[in-house]
Image (tube, grey):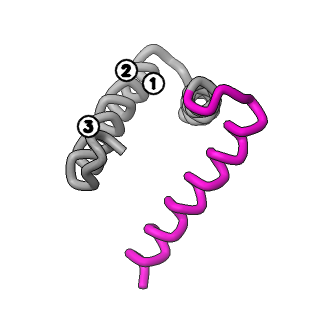
Amino acid sequence: MTGNDESVSTHAIEMCRKLNRSAATKYGEHGVSAEDVAIAAAYSAFDLAADLTGSRIAAIEWLRNAVDLVERQVMAEAA
């Protein structure tokens, strides 16, 4: 968590997501399919998680936990 502060962390996450979506749009403008962009983003998330955890196996578990968090948020918004 950025600065051990949830509001700062939330802002940082949104800033990063906006930058990543902007990059994805630019890749599309250069002919990269949305599927390839999404797969590349997943691999990039894995690379970052591996750097964070120091382990490729731990990175996979970290990503599972992250996807579970996203799922809970999406389900809460849909309710």
Q: Mostly what secondary structure, the magenta segment?
A: helix
* Residue 12 x %, y %: 27, 39
Earlier residue among tags 1 and 3: 3
Q: Are marks 1 and 2 in contact (CB under 8 Å)?
A: yes
Relative horizontal placement of residue 64, taking residue 16 as reference (left or right)? right
* Residue 59 x %, y %: 67, 37
Amino acid type assigned to the residue bearing label 1 in the image: Gly
Query: Is 24 drawn above or below residue 3 in the view shown?
Result: above
Q: CA distance from mark 1 to mark 2?
A: 5 Å
Q: Residue at horizontal 30%, vertical 47%?
A: 4
Q: Which mark is residue 28?
A: 1
Mark 2 Cα shell of 10 Å, populated few (<14), some (14-19), many (≥20):
few
| Residue placed most toward the observer, 68 or 55 | 55
Mark 3 Cα shell of 10 Å, populated few (<14), some (14-19), many (≥20):
few
Residue 37 sits in which quadrant?
top right
* Residue 68 x %, y %: 59, 62
Mark 1 Cα shell of 10 Å, populated few (<14), some (14-19), many (≥20):
some
Q: Residue at horizontal 72%, vertical 29%?
A: 55
Residue extending farthest to the front is 4
Q: Residue at horizontal 21%, vertical 54%?
A: 7
Q: Which mark is residue 15?
A: 3
Residue 29 sits in which quadrant?
top left
Q: Is residue 73 magenta?
A: yes
* Residue 78 x %, y %: 42, 78
Amino acid type assigned to the residue bearing label 3 in the image: Met
Amino acid type assigned to the residue bearing label 2 in the image: Lys
Q: Which quarter of the rendered picture does the N terminus lie within?
A: top left
Query: Is 10 drawn above or below residue 77 in the view shown?
Result: above
| Magenta-colored span | 52-79
Q: Residue at horizontal 51%, vertical 70%?
A: 72
| Residue placed most toward the observer, 25 or 68 | 68
Disc 2 target residue: 26
